[in-house]
Amino acid sequence: MPRMRLGRYAEFQRRQRAALRASQHPHQRVPADERVAARAPEAEAAEATPAAGSDRDPGGTTVGGEPTAYGPGAEAHGAHAQGGATAASPYGVAGRPLNRYSPLYIGFVGAVGVILAIGLARMLAKLSTTITILVVAFFLALALDPIVGWLLKRGVRRSLAVSAVFAGVVLVFALLGLLVVPTVIPQGAALLENAPEYVDRALNSSLVKRLDQDYGIVDRLQSEINSRLTDAGFVSQIFGGVLGAGRALANGVFQSFTVLILTLYFLASLPTVKGAVYAMVPASRRPRVISLAEEIMRRTGSYAIGQVAVATINALASYVMMRLVGIQYAAVLAVMVGFLGLIPMVGATIGAVLVCGVAFFSEPRAALIAATYYLIYQQLENYVVAPRIMARTVAVPGAVTVVAALAGGTLLGILGALLAIPVAAGLLLLYEEVLLPRQRHA
């Protein structure tokens, strides 16, 4: 067996050398043994059984009356074709194609491939924000599509169903804005108004007075503030930071509006988009690809709806608890707990720490009550609420969930953590339905 493989490899090398020599010297006659070695096995079989009616001379110079590429009449035929224009082409006969096994050809094609790869990577890096907006909009469209499908089953037209669902989303965000903004603006104004009083209270405290007597921190602090205010570079950095924050806020508002518009477009044209993508799949594999893709999208949309439901229950229960305990800024904190609850694995814990931290500065006893509440509620959410809601969405093992959330958060931050679990569910479906059956029948 090894000798047979070595013989085949030697025959392959001999054919390659003959083809390379023939491409580099197109007008030089190639010996008969190398000419036979350069031909493919199919060509040899075809030459061994010539078709009826074809005249082939023993020297191999003509086939059907035409000179071959390596026969003695090749030079005469090429000179005749180059000397006079034929009826088929006024510019003569095309030359021999490039040898794809030439080192120059391989190096040139490889260099072009590397240049194209670098250009594509730079283009994707510049389009990262746009790609992120598209991914978020498509994810939201998949999350809202089950609601649209539910309305379609009730006999509502798709245009009316999409309009109703989109209007509901806009209404929810408007209500959240009306709930948060009127509370944040007065509290922020009160904080700015009472800031000098807070500073005087801190400077007149016994701890600061003791430190000032021992180390003179008040004088040092005043001199540092005065030097900073008179420093042109520091002032420019402050204004640059303010302008940067304003620019970031404007970009955030614009990107949010763009995401909403793209979500509406994707939601309205989702069947058309899916049909166009499915049309590119070969007809023999199209039914299986459609079934797998529809199941992945169903799991993605169901997971998003389930996660929103779990986060909403957490926000409402937190609001009731904060109102009963008397924690300030209950409405704002409840909205923040709801948004943080969308982050898998750690979002609810971050929201609980935030509420307990705010409660601690106003009343330590309230912080203790809030910590006890969240300790009990998270157990109920992990073992009662979330399993019941997520039972029909995604079935991802716990270890895969943790690894997916960590990897997504590392790569794309909060957005990656949000998208990691549905992506892991889709990959797990492909593993179970595509990879494992192939391995069983291999």
Image (tube, rainbow, N blue to C red):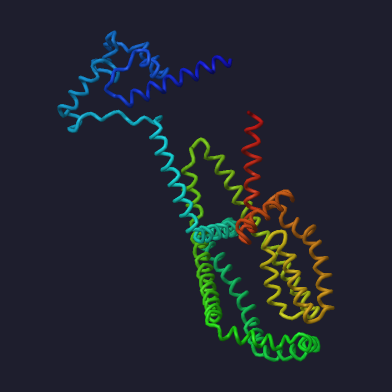
Q: Residue at x 50, y 52 (%)?
A: 271
| Residue 292 to residue 54: above or below | below
Q: Quadrant of residue 46?
A: top left
- Residues 93 and 196: in front is 196
Q: Left of 140 or right of it: where is 126?
A: left
Q: Residue at x 64, y 84 (%)?
A: 224
- Residues 223 and 168: in front is 223
The image position of residue 100, as x and y in percent, is: 39, 31
Q: Quadrant of residue 419?
A: bottom right
Picture quarter with the C terminus? top right
Q: Residue at x 65, y 32 (%)?
A: 439
| Residue 314 to residue 108: above or below | below
Q: Quadrant of residue 170?
A: bottom right
Q: Left of 430 or right of it: where is 34?
A: left
The image position of residue 374, as x and y in percent, is: 80, 68
| Residue 366 to residue 35: above or below | below
Picture quarter with the N terminus? top right
* Labels in figure, total: 0
The image position of residue 359, as x and y in percent, is: 77, 77
| Residue 16 to residue 252: above or below | above
The image position of residue 413, as x and y in percent, is: 62, 60
Q: Residue at x 71, y 55 (%)?
A: 390
